[in-house]
Image: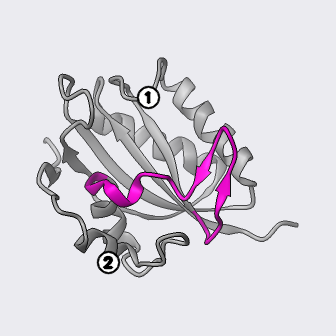
Amino acid sequence: MAEAMTVYLGFGSNLGDRQDNLKKAVEYLGERLRLGKVSSVYDTDPLGDTDQPRFLNMVCEVSTTLPPDGLLATVKGIESKMGRTGKSGMPRPIDIDILLYGNMVYNTPQLTIPHPRMHERAFVLVPLAEIAPDVIHPVKNKTIKQMLKGLKEVQGVLRWKEEA
């Protein structure tokens, strides 16, 4: 039996009922993996093509015995089930990224772990620092908290107040 790994996943949604999309994605994941800590939800500016709706983002910790490619297939399956189509950078009901997989460094044409741009993204580091401030990035060799402090800007990442 493979040893369970602690994995951190990033979630984003900017189409439809964004909050419900995040909730459903976590529920679907919980049917397949053991859920750990879940961050607060953050309302964030879109990156790149800024002519699109704002995102809701969050991070969660899961425990899995799936290898990285198996986990990727699982999250892509959830994205498809929830109506994700098209390519990166476009508005979408759900986006799930594998941020960290234990302290593994993994690089294939389909998947790079740790996520190659997570250290530059406040919408990833703010919620990740909330649930895993002392986890060390296996390439940068810094804690999540240190990487967050090193960001020049964290504007545009606001804690989401749930609508009644």
Question: Is 31 on the left or on the right of 23, as rendered?
Answer: right
Residue named by callout 2:
146
Q: Amino acid at mark 2?
A: Gln
Judge the density around disc 1: few (<14), some (14-19), many (≥20) Cα neighbours within 10 Å: few
Question: Is 58 on the left or on the right of 115, as rendered?
Answer: left
Q: Position of residue 126 (x, y in %)?
A: 27, 62
| Tag 1 secondary structure | loop
Q: Position of residue 7 (x, y in %)?
A: 57, 62
| Residue in the picture at 31% in, 61% down | 127
Q: Position of residue 77 (x, y in %)?
A: 62, 31
Question: Is 93 on the left or on the right of 158, as rendered?
Answer: right
Answer with the quarter of the image where residue 142 lies. Answer: bottom left
User: 27 or 100: nearer the eye?
Assistant: 100
Judge the density around disc 2: few (<14), some (14-19), many (≥20) Cα neighbours within 10 Å: some
| Residue in the picture at 72% in, 46% down | 69
| Residue in the picture at 55% in, 41% down | 28
User: 26 or 117: nearer the eye?
Assistant: 117
Q: Which residues are magenta?
A: 101-123
Residue named by callout 1:
88
Answer with the quarter of the image where residue 154 lies. Answer: bottom left
Identify whether 32 is placed above or below 84. Answer: below
